[in-house]
Image (tube, rainbow, N blue to C red):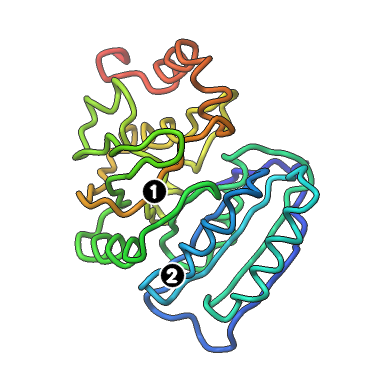
Amino acid sequence: MTLFKPWDPAPNGIFSHKKKTPPPPDLISICLTHYNYTDYVIECLDSLAEQTHQALDLVFIDDASTQDSVIPLILSWLESNKNRFYRITFLENKYNQGPSFSRNMAFKHALAPSVFIIDADNMLYPEALEKLYATLQHGNFPAVYCQLEEFGDRTGIGRADIWDPDLMRKANYVDVMALVRKTAWQQVGGFSHIEEGWEDYDFWLKFIDHNLEPAYLPEILCRYRVHENSRTAREALRAHHRLELIMAFRHPTPLDKT
């Protein structure tokens, strides 16, 4: 599967650390994407370090942040916490590429057969990865997602529910914070770049296109930060109608195909 163009510049390697022991059989890779989240990134990283699941491979992608202080801040944290992880890979895109490119790059570099996706403004509760991994393994699902807690500018519970293709075609209720098998990511063609957002929704609609059924774990394990600097707030809300049309074109229903 070719997700990257020949002219796409390889990211810069900023930091790398790996234990000398063989990879643990229950290793989980974490795809952590970041862009100008100096105020939030350390809280996110702390929540990853506090996971009860011990075998973690952290793949951190910075999407050419423009805040001068952010790279030294992250490097300091990674150096202080490097022994918590089986491996850390910190990469920086040469120029801003957007979340789809960054996530695909993280999947490309991931060591483990399953990858948890998180943006650097969000957080996890300590048992999140342990419980998601157990569900993924025991049920042999292509992916597992859970319920969210919203915090920040708005507080409440997310809209996650049991996977239903008919409901998903009407509106997205599954966040990208999920544990996804690399084989499923490869089967659906990874993340696609879409101007102004909804790459997450597009990714899940690809699961429907390929008859893949993720599992829903009905526990509040992930924390979704609501704030005015998020891409959802800055771009996707303003382009809502146009994005609906794009999704309908990219993912026609079976009736539309006849």
Mark 1–mark 2 contact, CB under 8 Å? Answer: no
Q: Residue at 58% of width from left, 84% of height from top? A: 19
- Depth check: give the residue in front, 38 or 58: 38
Query: Which one is earlier in the sequence, the residue at label 1 or at label 2?
Result: 2
Q: Residue at 80% of width from left, 49% of height from top? A: 68
- Depth check: give the residue in front, 85 or 186: 85
Marks 1 and 2 sit apart, C-alpha to C-alpha, by 14 Å
| Viewport quadrant of the C terminus | top left
Q: Which numbered tag is attached to residue 223? A: 1
> Mark 1 is on which residue type?
Arg
Residue 69's place in the image compared with 243, above or below, is: below
> Mark 2 is on which residue type?
Glu
The x and y percentages for residue 247 are: 43, 20
Dot 2 lies on which element?
loop
The x and y percentages for residue 79 are: 68, 74
Question: Mark 1, residues whose alpha carbon is within 10 Å: few (<14), some, or many (≥20)?
Answer: many
The x and y percentages for residue 223 are: 39, 48
Compared across the picture, whether 159 is left or right of 235 comes to left
Compared across the picture, whether 27 is left or right of 147 comes to right
Q: Residue at 61% of width from left, 51% of height from top? A: 105
The x and y percentages for residue 136 are: 27, 60
Residue 167's place in the image compared with 88, above or below, is: above
Q: Which numbered tag is attached to residue 50? A: 2
